[in-house]
């Protein structure tokens, strides 16, 4: 092996990459100069009101179109009214009546763990303190102890009196000599705890009366050693005045690294603390994120209870109200995630805040080497679409070690073959293989992959167009991880609305699979910021799907019984069955002019074929569909893709 030649080749590629980046920066500067010149023009400034009115009309016309016209708008208004009414079921209406309370209080569990609830107190308002303690006393499960460490100053000496007014031996109180901060005070609470399980509770929040009962159920039924639930923020001291309801996915490591979605109400087996601390003071402000990352790493069975059981009070100075009140929390959260990543062997990563929120992160992993990526593109005629797709790859991609395999299948236009010849002359990275026989999307792509030389395979539709120049790097940094199966990007229609941002099984009229955030605008942050960070999903679309070639072979590629539809979802489920994570990243963006190549699936023979493949899919994955998508909360509607609350 000529290492000097390899080294020189790498230097040349880096030089070309640097040149390309410089060209883009120069183009950006030129466009910025022109834009500023326009904005400073007196006529431009004078026409501002007219432009605002015009853009307002355009935006609303687009919304009307995406909603299906006036009928669609009326349907959404009606749904939102019913959804608002349904939301009331999550407040006090969800509390147990006398009969249910009696049943739960007398429930017989094989194992009744003592749960130590830790609450650090600091200058807590009287009414909030009482409501917090009351919510623990109202629990239908009675084997608990409330451990309170009080760091309040002399002006708030009443805190001790309020606590002592409760004549309950299960409440343990310690007055601290000095306030030791969130971490220090909570660690003092732990010194009071004698329980087998530890729960973390804020001094101004409220627990649902059935919270501990639900947790003990999953401890007994599933041997859970780390449990969390859904939560909501509320205002005006009334939990029925909910601001944001956070219905969470099941345990998702990539979500957790990017965003502390678990948050409240964490309860875990005390043994998970062996060899580690509860809260570490150097992560004050994000001590819970640090702790959750460490303890979930050690846990054997993490269970999400998909019920809204925690009420997070929003008031002046609380994190729920304003993260800027605790700016140090942002730096602490980055530090906690960095420490976690290092413990998993990652180096040279970068953590940055996203447009969604300062503590919702983008993580850039180091790419190991420059492995060859085989981009497989199935094509039948539609030469203009293919030219646009391939040109965008060649012109915009900053990652250069790839090959493009075009799989020709039954084209009839002679000019298509002229296009193939022209493309091959454009770059020696491009080759064409021919599929013969009746069109079968799975067979076509399986043939393409069988000709791939790359360590990684990227399925790509011919009606896509690259937007982000480092799209291959964004996909590759996840695909190279040992725990990851398929990786997919964020795809838009021509009108800049979302076509793909992850796939949920069971979603849609056929109850097979559907895309979330469908037809939302490109600027939309998504439900709880989910369009702004990389996350685990059950499946991604085959229109842009990267996977290791070895994993492709391990699960046998695309199932050819799914000739046209659902083969990508089936493929991702096969990977998941093998224990791999599938990942959606919003940082690899492309246009997807969907169905240009093969048309829609809602009419005639195509509809009949789709119905048959849907039935086949539902039968094959019956158990997975019955369990539900772990990354899509059961409180969401399966009839809508916008994270609307399920209406019972």
Image: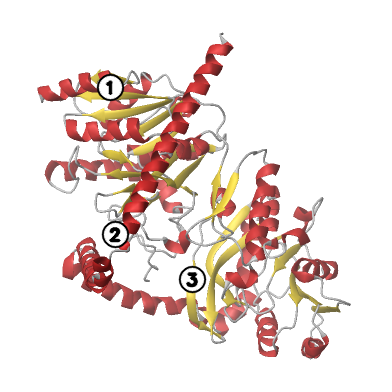
Residue drawn at x 33%, y 37% is 567
CA distance for labels 2 and 3: 43 Å
Q: Position of residue 26 (x, y in %)?
A: 40, 42
* Quadrant (top left, top right, bottom left, bottom right) of the C terminus: bottom left
Give the CA distance from mark 2 to mark 1: 37 Å
Q: Is residue 117 visible?
A: yes
Residue occupied by mark 1: 426
Residue with the mark numbered 2: 38
Question: For numbered disc 2, what is the local secondary structure?
Answer: helix
Total tally of numbered discs in the picture: 3
Q: Secondary structure at mark 1?
A: helix
Label 3 – label 1 distance at C-alpha: 53 Å
Q: Position of residue 273 (x, y in %)?
A: 78, 55
User: Which residue lies most toward the top here?
Assistant: 1
- Res. 245 mark: 3
Q: Secondary structure at mark 3?
A: strand
Residue 269 seen in the figure: no
Of circles 2 and 1, which is in front?
A: 2
Residue at 18 percent of width and 26 percent of height: 438
Graded by Cα atoms within 10 Å as few (under 14), some (14 to 19) or many (20 or more), the crowding at tag 3 reads some
Residue 510: x %, y % from top left: 28, 52
Q: Classify 10 Å Cα crowding around label 1: few (below 14), some (14-19), many (20 and above).
A: few
Compare residues 457 and 99 and report the one nearer the observer.
457
Would you say 60 lies left or right of 113 here? Answer: left
Disc on res. 311:
none
Pair 3/1: label in front: 1
Residue 435's image quarter? top left
Q: Earlier in the sequence, mark 2 or mark 1?
A: 2
Closer to the N terminus: mark 2 or mark 3? Answer: 2
Q: Residues within 10 Å of mark 2 (few under 14, many from 20)?
A: few
Compare marks 3 and 1 and give the one earlier in the sequence. 3
């Amino acid at each position: 092996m000529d290492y000097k030649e390899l080294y020189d080749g790498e230097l040349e590629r880096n030089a070309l990459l640097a040149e390309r980046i410089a060209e883009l920066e120069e183009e950006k500067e030129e466009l910025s100069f022109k834009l500023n010149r326009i904005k400073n023009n007196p006529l431009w400034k004078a026409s501002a009101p007219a432009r605002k009115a015009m853009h307002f009309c355009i935006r609303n016309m687009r919304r009307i179109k995406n909603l299906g016209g006036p009928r669609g708008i009326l349907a959404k208004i009606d749904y939102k009214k019913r959804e608002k009414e349904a939301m009331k079921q999550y407040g006090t209406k969800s509390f147990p009546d006398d009969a249910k309370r009696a049943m739960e209080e007398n429930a017989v569990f094989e194992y009744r763990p003592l749960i130590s609830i830790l609450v650090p107190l600091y200058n807590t308002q009287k009414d909030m303190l009482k409501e917090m303690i009351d919510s623990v006393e109202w629990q239908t499960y009675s084997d608990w102890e409330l451990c309170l460490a009080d760091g309040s100053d002399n002006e708030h000496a009443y805190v001790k009196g309020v606590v002592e007014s409760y004549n309950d031996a299960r409440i343990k109180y310690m007055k601290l000599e000095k306030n030791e901060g969130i971490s220090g005070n909570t660690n003092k609470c732990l010194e009071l705890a004698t329980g087998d399980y530890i729960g973390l509770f804020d001094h101004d929040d409220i627990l649902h009366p059935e919270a501990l009962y639900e947790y003990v159920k999953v401890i007994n039924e599933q041997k859970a050693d780390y449990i969390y639930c859904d939560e909501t923020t509320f205002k005006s001291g009334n939990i029925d005045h909910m601001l944001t309801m956070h219905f969470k996915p099941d345990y998702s490591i990539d979500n957790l690294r990017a965003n502390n979605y678990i948050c409240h109400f964490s309860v875990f087996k005390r043994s998970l603390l062996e060899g580690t601390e509860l809260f570490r003071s150097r992560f004050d402000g994000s001590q819970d994120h640090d702790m959750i990352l460490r303890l979930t790493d050690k846990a054997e069975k993490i269970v999400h209870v998909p019920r809204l059981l925690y009420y997070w009070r929003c008031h002046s100075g609380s994190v729920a109200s304003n993260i800027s009140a605790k700016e140090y929390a942002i730096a602490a959260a980055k530090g906690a995630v960095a420490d976690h990543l290092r413990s998993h062997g990652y180096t040279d990563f970068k953590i940055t805040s996203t447009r969604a929120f300062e503590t919702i992160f983008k993580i850039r992993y180091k790419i190991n080497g420059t492995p060859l990526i085989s981009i497989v593109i199935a094509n039948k005629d539609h030469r203009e679409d293919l030219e646009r797709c391939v040109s965008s790859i060649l012109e915009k991609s900053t990652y250069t070690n790839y090959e493009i395999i075009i799989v020709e299948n039954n084209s009839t236009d002679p000019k298509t073959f002229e296009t193939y010849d022209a493309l091959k002359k454009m770059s020696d990275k491009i080759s064409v293989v021919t599929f013969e026989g009746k069109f079968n999307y799975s067979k076509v792509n399986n043939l393409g992959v069988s000709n791939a030389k790359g360590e990684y395979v990227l399925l790509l539709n011919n009606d896509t167009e690259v937007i982000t120049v480092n799209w291959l790097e964004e996909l590759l940094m996840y695909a190279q991880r040992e725990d990851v199966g398929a990786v997919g990007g964020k795809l838009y229609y021509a009108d800049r609305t979302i076509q793909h941002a992850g796939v949920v099984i069971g979603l849609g009229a056929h109850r097979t699979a559907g895309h979330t955030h469908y037809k939302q605008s490109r600027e939309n942050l998504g439900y709880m910021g989910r369009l702004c960070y990389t996350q685990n999903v059950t499946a991604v679309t085959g229109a842009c799907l990267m996977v290791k070639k070895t994993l492709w072979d391990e699960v046998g590629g695309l199932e050819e019984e799914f000739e046209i539809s659902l083969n990508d979802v089936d493929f991702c489920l096969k990977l998941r069955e093998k224990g791999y994570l599938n990942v959606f990243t919003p940082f690899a963006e492309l246009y997807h002019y969907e169905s240009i190549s093969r048309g829609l699936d809602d009419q005639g023979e195509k509809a009949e074929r789709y119905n048959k493949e849907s039935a086949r899919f539902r039968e094959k994955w019956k158990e997975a569909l019955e369990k539900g998508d772990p990354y899509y909360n059961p409180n969401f509607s399966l009839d809508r893709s916008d994270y609307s609350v399920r209406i019972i």
